[in-house]
Image (tube, grey):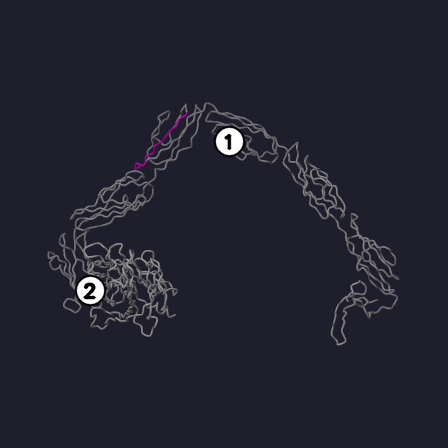
Amino acid sequence: MAQSSFAAHTKGGLMYYRYLGPGSAPNTARYMITLKIYTKCILDNPPQFCPTVVISIFNGANNQLIEKVPVIYSSVLDIQNCISPECYPCISGPPSICVKITTYEFVKDLPITANGYTISYQRCCRISGIINMIQPTNFTGDTWTVNIPGNAASPLAPFNSSAIFPQNDTAIICRENYFTYNFGASDPNNDSLIYSFTNALVGTPDGSTGGSCVNDFALAPPYNSVAYQGPYSGSMPLGNNVSINRFTGLISGVAPATSGIYVITVTVTEYIRGTNIKRGEVRKSIHVEVADCITTKALLSPEYYSCDDLSVSFYNQTSGYTIITYDWEFGDPASGVNNTTTVQFPTHIYSAPGDYIVKLTVNRGLPCSDSTTAVVKVYPVFDPGFTLQGQCKNATIQFSDISTSTSSNVNFWSWNFGDINAGNSNNISSLQNPTHVYTAANIYDVSFIVATDKGCRDTIYKTISINDNPPLTLPNDTLICYIDTLQINAVGTGSFLWSPNYNINNINIANPLVSPDVPATYTATLTDQFGCISTGSVNVDVKLFVTLFGGNDSTICRGDPAVLKITSDALQYQWSPATDLNDPTLKNPTAIPLTTTTYRVIANIGNCIAQDDITLTTVPYPVANAGPDLHICLGGSAQLNAGGGSIYSWSPTAFLTAANIPDPISVNPTDNVRYIVTVRDVLGCPKPVKDTMILFVDKITADAGPRDTSVVINQPLQLNATGSINYSWSPTTWLNDPSIYNPVTLPQNNIEYVVRVSNSIGCFDTDSIRVKVFKVKPDFYVPNAFTPNGDGNNDIFRPIALGLRSLDIFRVFNRWGQMLYSGTGNGAG
């Protein structure tokens, strides 16, 4: 969180160096490196101030890190502006500005090399909401860097000292008001200094490197620019109304309309005086505030032009609550009393064309008075314009200036033809009446800047259409009979010219009649209203007769489609009968006849006619019959019987004695099988037809009930068998009905009953049940011992309920009352 507190108030800084003399070792130089970091003056905020920073030194040849130098601060200075009315009597609402400047310096001996060194320090982050940067800005760091040159460019370069910017960072900038801000630097070597706006640099995006007061280090160069928000950029940090004097470093102009924080970076470049030999450069990057204050200033445009009439309107380009009066002098004595006015927004009608000087004085004779002048050029009437001739691609387009001026001479022309495909040099022209060739049909935006020798200037914009070759549509190549006449129908807008002039009734119409007696090619030339030309040709072949061969008759399966194929050079065809044809006018229609049919085709080229027949004989599909579904007993076999054709194929082949005969045997199938037979015929339709039968395998599993059961004498027992639909019990002794599945017996002695279970086709199975008869009274008998040794005898301890219908529950407890077992039913144990 401390880092974020720092980030919220970082304002910028700079880095520079001074040459102190030779180093202690041979071929070395001694430098003092200075880093100044600007923050806001906020008390009791430790992250604003770092006692130690780590400055990185990189090899200028390969950007490799050479050394990390911890540097303790040498001084901390607060610079604050005065906000009392006495300090800024001509600014309403001046903002309070306080900048804390922390200085870090160290001395370093560095070997003199060809490429020198890059010295850098990075931190995160900048202020939130910087106006001229893309948001968010509070995660965009800052980089302070300076290059110490090597001796590759000049032997004296390593002995240079940087230019030094002043510490005057409390300039007041009021939005939409004129201001000046001096970035002028001094140079200990008396070099020539050139100033420019440049890009601010990105630092570390978070605290991972150089983000807080720890011994981190800068990333290696090169360094990227911050992302600017249009219309601002590194070269226009405050918009296009603010500039820097490249020789003095004075920033001036009208501040942008939006108040807030802006980043400004100025680079001063040193040149050996009187030469263009560059010695070094220093970059100063700060955050400045454009405030909601207003200055008292008289500010006009440098020049005013009136090229339409004699009237010119004026206004003061700054405004403020402290401006009380306006005094205008239009520099036009011939206008008499109208030559001056005190209104705020005047319009003056000049007495004649010419050059004039207008003067504005605000607060004349009052505090905060100011004045300025501007040049006024009045030269009506200037009427710019141009024309063009031609509108076709790949043709010369003539552009002509038709601009006129009654009081001056037109002497400047700048054309942009809007043709990006032509390359920059061919897309522009400074001629009065240039020509241009567009190679592609398209819409082009042409701009024409024209000016006079008196300074009148205007830009004309026109959107022009460059056409492709005019649309021309011709019929396909064709043929005619030698005794016929053909009309060629061309479609297009413009004038036509046909060639050759051979057996054609009119060469200047779109749809002439031709009657060649030998093959000929007729070419149409179409010229539209702009002179654009298109050409096209039609080949006309001439036939003495129609060639027609109907092909062989054929046999097809009834209901199948068949294409009627003929060989012919005719133009039109008519088939009959049309029944069962998809289109009787096609050369090769598709037929689906249900009976044998003879089709006749009449083919013609104009009045030349030929005809022929094709017969399609239809034969029916074979009628496949796999036979009825069958039932067999498990372990049995079945004879399959198919019919309807000459060739048979069964699938699946499982359990079959053969798969390619009509009557194979399915031997001992283990489960139901769905057999599919594919039938073909060698006499009629050869296409296959399928049919299906199912072979059901019946499985009987007889169940007479529990294997052993017990009753007491004279206790009836109901038997209960399952497995199919037919039942037969034996012996029949004591049974009430031996032919049902659940007869009742009253056994008098032990007996074993066998049940035979069968279905409707005779599949059967048997099972038995042994009945033990106890000649005792009905009771509940519990054994007093059992032998759980797994020999099959007395392994389970359970009671015997003799003569009782059911045993609901049986439980076993030990002597302490703990339950050891619980079960239900007569067999529980």
Q: Quadrant of the C terminus?
A: bottom right
- Disc nearer the start of the sequence (2/1): 2
In the drawing, what numbered circle is on residue 297?
2
Which label number is shown at residue 587?
1
* Label 2–label 1 contact, CB within 8 A: no
Q: Can residue 260 be seen in this view?
A: no
Q: Distance between the residues labelled 2 and 1?
A: 92 Å
Does 466 lie within the magenta span? Answer: no
* Whether residue 166 is situated above or below residue 599 in the rendered picture: below
Asked where in the image residue 248 lies, by quadrant, the reply is bottom left
Q: Picture quarter containing residue 735?
A: bottom right
The front one of 463 and 3 is 3
Q: Which amino acid does label 2 sit on?
A: Lys
- Image point 79% across, 48% down: which residue? 762
Residues in magenta? 519-532
Q: Is residue 143 left or right of residue 161?
A: right
